[in-house]
Amino acid sequence: MPDYFLDIQYNNITYCEEEVNFKEFESCVFNRCDFSQCNFIAVTFIDCTFNNCNFNASKINHVAFRTVYFNSCQIKDVNFSMCDKLIFEIHFKDCMLDFSKFYTLKLKGTTFTNCSLVAVDFMSADLSEVQFNNCDLYRAEFEKAIANKADFRTSYNYTIDPEKTKLTKAQFSIYGLKGLLAKHQIIVE
């Protein structure tokens, strides 16, 4: 049975590699904590919030995120694709997620607001109804993704091939059209 922590606030903690393993956190808030050295095993976060935390290059292969909010966090080069998929729900605001991976995940309804998503791997992910609000999607990969009803209207620098990505009723601004036509070498001014 894992250790269980309810409604606790954690501030300015640097966690070592195995410190959070086999623990369950519910309704907890983490402020300015550093998880970059962690190699998570059997960790569950339920209704938790992370503010100004560092997850850069952490190994989160065995983590359950159940309604979790990341605010102003550094989450570069993190592979979310091996997370527990049961009740998986995450939201990001003002986060740096460059080079992270969401390969094959069901992200339906996820929100990314004011995030840097440079070279993020969304291949084969379910991005249905995802909100990309003012996000930099430079070199993000969407091949074989399902992005039906996704909202890209305020995001920028994306290149999406509509022949390799399902985009039924996805929303784009007129300024983003060049990102949908790039493979055809059409110039949009």
Image (cartoon, rainbow, N blue to C red):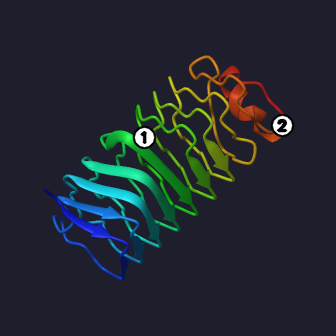
- Compared across the picture, whether 55 is left or right of 52 comes to left
Q: CA distance from mark 1 to mark 2?
A: 27 Å
Picture layout, residue 131 above or below residue 27? above
Picture layout, residue 16 above or below residue 66? below
Which residue is found at the position 49% from the left and 44% from the top?
Answer: 119
Tag 1: residue type? Phe
Q: Earlier in the sequence, mark 1 or mark 2?
A: 1
* Quarter containing the N terminus: bottom left
User: Disc 1, disc 2: CB below 8 Å?
Assistant: no
**To which quarter of the image does residue 101 belong?**
top left
**Image coordinates for residue 145, horizontal then vertical, percent:** 52, 27
Query: Looking at the image, which is closer to me, 165 or 1?
Result: 1
Picture layout, residue 66 above or below residue 27? above
**To which quarter of the image does residue 157 belong?**
top right
The label on residue 174 is 2
**Residue lying farthest left?**
1
**To which quarter of the image does residue 58 belong?**
bottom left
Which residue is found at the position 44% from the left and 67% from the top?
Answer: 50
Question: How many marks can you see?
Answer: 2
- Compared across the picture, whether 45 is left or right of 164 comes to left
Residue that badge 1 annotates: 102
**Image coordinates for residue 81, horizontal then vertical, percent:** 35, 40
Tag 2: residue type? Ile
Looking at the rendered structure, the secondary structure element under dot 2 is helix
Crowding at mark 1 (Cα within 10 Å: few <14, some 14-19, many 20+): many
Looking at the rendered structure, the secondary structure element under dot 1 is loop
**Image coordinates for residue 136, horizontal then vertical, percent:** 62, 51
Picture layout, residue 54 above or below residue 153? below
The label on residue 151 is none
- Compared across the picture, whether 183 is left or right of 12 comes to right
